[in-house]
Image (cartoon, grey):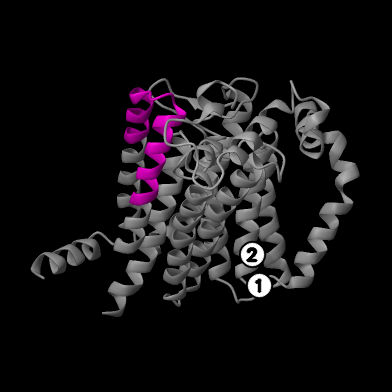
């Protein structure tokens, strides 16, 4: 009993939610196990991911300690800094085929990942200081704040990240009380603008969309990735082929099995039961965050938590739909499962912010 009380007190002192932390730890542990198989049992790959998750966990702890008043005060400066980094990428960025990273020799990072937190932060800070639901002038300002980073990221080019960031920003506007007629109007405008937007897309982006509509048009070229991914997902059956026994990844058929298509490895090796288990973990994390948001009456905390939760949900939805052939391939990682440093650090940082805003409410109420 004493140990239990000490443990609970420790979580409270660190501004952490024990249920959410347990779920995140379970998800990261499962991710490392899948990565070990998808990476051809390369322990170096796993060690690198453990280090990256460790750095992300430190960021989670640090952000959980920052009080709400500082987030509100710093939001404009964070947004200006993030926009400056995106402009820097435009002129001095590095990458293979696309300028998306800043290389500081000691560290290499992708500024667009930081914008996934900074944009909801800026929108939540701006809207929470004004009457809700927002006036049409505030909605226009919100759209401008969303359009600026999305336009720069789209030029890198990074269509997938641009869509996710835009969706995360729109979710904050929606939670603030954006009327449904505006949402339907924007959806209709988006559909009507397809003939205008299509010529503006890069050739490889057009090919991805055409391949999504008909993968068999180029089965050995553009369609290869999605065809092999769907074979891996379908061949898992109910219980899968077994851990480390997936043929699609281990025989070299599945592209990027440790990053974008790692869900296909899980589906093949753990089958339908493994997929359901992973989805239940994701659902539990999302529902717990929604519960934390519902327990606070502060507009800024609710908008911020809601925006970050929606972004996490969008990550999961787009990646699984992508590897299953339901949406075009846009290069979105599976949260805390896919190999990658910047993405994992950003996601964990977001969960740190969520827990800090919620626990701040609990401490203030006492």
Please name the residue shown 57% across and 35% down the image. Answer: 261
Category of crowding for the residue at label 1, using alpha-carbon neighbours closer than 10 angstroms: few (below 14), some (14–19), many (at least 20): some
Q: Nearer the viewer, residue 338 or 298?
A: 338
How many numbered markers are drawn? 2
Q: Nearer the viewer, residue 206 or 58?
A: 206
**Residue drawn at 56 percent across, 20 percent down:** 252
Give the residue displayed 31% in from the left and 74% down from the top: 362
**Taking 191 as reference, is 104 left or right?**
left
Q: Position of residue 179 (x, y in %)?
A: 73, 73
Q: Quadrant of residue 96?
A: top right
The secondary structure type at the circle numbered 1 is loop
The answer to whether residue 96 is magenta is: no
CA gap, disc 2 and disc 1: 8 Å
Q: Which mark is residue 134?
A: 1
Q: Quadrant of residue 129?
A: bottom right
Q: Quadrant of the C terminus?
A: bottom left
Q: Position of residue 42 (x, y in %)?
A: 38, 23
In the rendered image, residue 34 lying in the magenta stretch gets the answer yes
Question: Which residue in the protein does label 2 denote?
Answer: 173
Bounds of the magenta segment: 25-51
Q: Earlier in the sequence, mark 2 or mark 1?
A: 1
Q: Quadrant of the N terminus?
A: bottom left
Evaluate whether residue 201 shows in this view.
no
Rendered location of residue 295, percent (x, y): 42, 76
Contact flag, marks 2 and 1 (Cβ < 8 Å): yes
Say above or below: 133 vs 59.
below
Magenta stretch: dominant secondary structure: helix
For the residues carrying marks 2 and 1, which lies nearer the camera in this image? Answer: 2
Give the camera-side residue of 208 and 354.
Answer: 208
Secondary structure, mark 2, is: helix
**Does residue 345 lie above or below 258 as drawn?**
below
């Amino acid at each position: 009993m004493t140990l239990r009380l000490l443990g609970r007190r420790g979580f409270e002192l660190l501004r952490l939610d024990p249920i959410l932390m347990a779920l995140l730890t379970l998800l990261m542990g499962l991710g490392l196990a899948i990565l070990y198989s998808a990476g051809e049992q390369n322990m170096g790959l796993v060690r690198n991911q453990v280090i990256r998750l460790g750095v992300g966990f430190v960021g989670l702890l640090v952000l959980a300690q920052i009080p709400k008043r500082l987030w509100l005060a710093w939001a404009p400066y964070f947004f200006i800094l993030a926009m400056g980094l995106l402009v820097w990428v435009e002129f001095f960025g590095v990458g293979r085929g696309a300028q998306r990273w800043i290389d500081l020799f000691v560290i290499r990072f992708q500024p667009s990942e930081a914008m996934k937190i900074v944009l909801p932060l800026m929108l939540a800070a701006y809207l929470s200081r004004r009457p809700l639901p927002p006036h049409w002038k505030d909605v226009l300002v919100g759209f401008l704040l969303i359009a600026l980073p999305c336009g720069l990221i789209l030029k890198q080019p990074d269509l997938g990240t641009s869509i996710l960031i835009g969706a995360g920003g729109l979710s904050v506007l929606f939670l603030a009380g954006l009327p449904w007629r505006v949402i339907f109007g924007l959806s209709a405008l988006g559909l009507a603008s397809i003939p205008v937007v299509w010529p503006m897309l890069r050739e490889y982006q057009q090919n991805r969309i055409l391949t999504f509509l008909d993968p068999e048009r180029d089965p050995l070229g553009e369609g290869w990735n999605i065809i092999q991914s769907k074979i891996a997902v379908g061949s898992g059956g109910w219980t899968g082929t077994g851990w480390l026994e997936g043929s699609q990844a281990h025989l070299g058929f599945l592209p990027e099995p440790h990053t974008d298509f790692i869900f296909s490895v899980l589906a093949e090796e753990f089958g339908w039961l493994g997929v359901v288990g992973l989805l239940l973990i994701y659902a539990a994390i999302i529902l717990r965050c929604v519960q934390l948001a519902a327990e606070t009456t502060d507009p800024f905390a609710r908008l911020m938590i809601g925006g970050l939760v929606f972004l996490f949900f969008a990550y999961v939805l787009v990646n699984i739909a992508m590897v299953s052939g339901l949406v075009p391939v846009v290069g979105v990682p599976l949260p805390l499962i896919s190999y990658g440093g910047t993405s994992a650090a950003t996601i964990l940082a977001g969960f740190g912010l969520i827990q800090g805003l919620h626990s701040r409410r609990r401490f203030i109420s006492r």
